[in-house]
Each structure stands twice: as structure tokens, then as C-alpha cells.
Amino acid sequence: IRDEQMAASTHAPYADAHQARLNNVHVNGHHYSSWIAQTHDTNQWLKIDLVNVTKVACVATQGSQEFQDWVTGYTIGYSMDGTAWTVYQEEGVDKIFNGNNDNNTVKTNCLKRAVLMRYIKIMVASFHNKIALRVELYGKVQD
């Protein structure tokens, strides 16, 4: 996934959306290890354009490498056109995934049913201290 395929609701300086890559590390004087929101509330999101229609099965997350900041809960939105969004549900209810319990441990959540999408939006439901996120998606590009 290229940098320009990643976007966010807001971002702090040197903590752009494209820093939100699993196991990314802090480079002194250049960038932080993760996406860090500029505004810390539950209206924040990270969006990825997968370019191709992809069946997404799992999402892995981490918080910030260098700070005690992480996302503790999130929902997933998905779209084929980037305009009309559907929130992933289980048993008819928006699924809030349990996020991280610390800043560096990888937490993987798998969907009960993989979903076809071109765009995914990870929407922050709760966080520890500040919103910081590194993410990786697992799935299969559709032919």
C-alpha cells in the first residue's frame, strides 16, 4: 500500500496517516512511528484505499512505538466507492473490536465473515491517553 492510499480525519505534525504501518518505528527528526490524531476524540478515523476490490478477513493493530498511546476500541467501515459507507456488523449490531492494551503488542482481530471492499475506515471508538495507530490488513485481492 502506497503512502497516498492512506488518509486520516486529522493528524499531528510528523504523524501522517501513512505512518500507520504495523511495526513502523520512530525516526528521530523525521517522523513518529504511527498515525497520531491531531484531535483526540471518537470522531477520528484512518482510511485506506485498497485500489482493488479486496476480501478483508483480519485487521492487526498497534499503538505508538515511542509513547504510551493506543486505540482500545474501534469499528470498521467499508465502501466500494469511498462515499457510501457500511459499518461492519455482527448479529445486526455495529461491531466494536477490542483494540490494544499497550503501545507495542500486535492485536489481531478477524471478522466473523470476510468482507469485500475497496476502501476501509478504522473508526476510533475508545483510546488510551491519545489516539495513535499502526495497522495491517489481511485478505485477498479479488480478480
Image: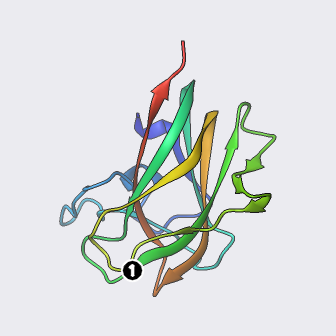
Where is residue 65 shown, x and y percent of the image? 26, 70
Total tally of numbered discs in the picture: 1
Q: Amino acid at mark 1?
A: Asp
User: Helix, strand or loop at disc 1?
Assistant: loop
Residue shown at the point (46%, 51%) measured from the top left: 59
Instruction: Judge by depth and name the residue closer to the eye, 61 or 114.
Output: 114
Query: Which quadrant, please, contains the N terminus?
Result: top left
Where is residue 108 shown, x and y percent of the image? 39, 58
Residue shown at the point (51%, 64%) measured from the top left: 11
- Left of 91 or right of it: where is 67? left
- Left of 93 or right of it: where is 51? left
**Residue occupying the far left of the picture:** 28
> Which residue is tagged 1?
69
Occupied quadrant, residue 129: bottom left
Query: Colour scheme of this structure image?
Result: rainbow
- Image height check: is 1 above or below 91? above
Where is residue 7 shown, x and y percent of the image? 55, 49
**Residue occupying the far bottom of the picture:** 129
